[in-house]
Image (cartoon, grey):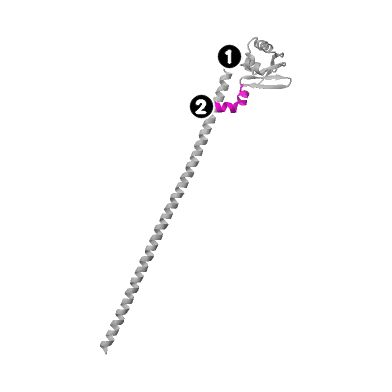
Amino acid sequence: MQEGAEKIIRQIREDTQQQVDALVSEANKTADRIIADAEEKAAGRKEQLIEKAEKEAAEQKRRILGVAQLEARKELLTAKQELIEKAFRESLQNLANLEEDKYFELIKKMLLVYAQGTNEEVIFSTADRARVPSGFLDAVNKELAEEGKKGKISLSEEERELQGGFILKSEGLEINCSFSSLLNMQRDELETEVASLLFS
């Protein structure tokens, strides 16, 4: 009788052990599957994070390059404008510093172009008024008459702050023929030409 009870107990233990082993095996399989899934998801997430980081880095690089290129273009434009400005200043200075005979030959040509044929006064700077050659306006008036312009040009008592050139005045009307004014009037066109000379 005792022997039969031991057999039953042994059988129960074996059955129980088998069930426990099966449960442990199933639990291990489930755990392995969960770990594998987690690792797979983690790997996928890692790839996503790397891809996102790479995209963000590329976008940041693109932005930085864009800003750098914009700054470089601005600096280049500023440098070009400074060179053009310098070229204009030097041109103005060169005109104002022409040798006296060449300077007044240029003034004469300008007077012949801008004189309207009425009685006009020419206004110079203090420095230019003091150095007008003797008989200069007589020669200008002679050529005006040859061109059929009846008016005469006379030297004004008035003086102006001018860096070369003159103001032509008649009956309250003034034509600004200073070098700086004439250069400024032609500036857009001249800037294109100067830019092509400087940067081509």
**In the rendered image, the vertical position of residue 128 relative to residue 86, given as above or below:** above
Q: Which residue range is magenta in the image?
A: 179-200
Comparing labels 2 and 1, the label whose residue is closer to the camera: 2
* SS category of the residue bearing label 1: helix
Q: Residue at x 51, y 33 (%)?
A: 76
Question: Looking at the image, can residue 54 be seen?
Answer: yes
Q: Position of residue 137 (x, y in %)?
A: 66, 12
Q: Position of residue 30 (x, y in %)?
A: 37, 68
Circle 2 is placed at which residue position?
A: 198
Q: CA distance from mark 2 to mark 1?
A: 27 Å
Q: Residue at image x 29%, y 83%?
A: 9
* Residue 86 visible (yes or no): no
Viewer-proximal residue among 151 and 82:
151
Q: Quadrant of residue 110?
A: top right
Q: Is residue 50 above or below residue 76?
A: below
Membership of 190 in magenta stretch? yes
- Front-most of residues 68 and 37: 37
Mark 1 or mark 2, which is nearer the start of the sequence?
A: 1
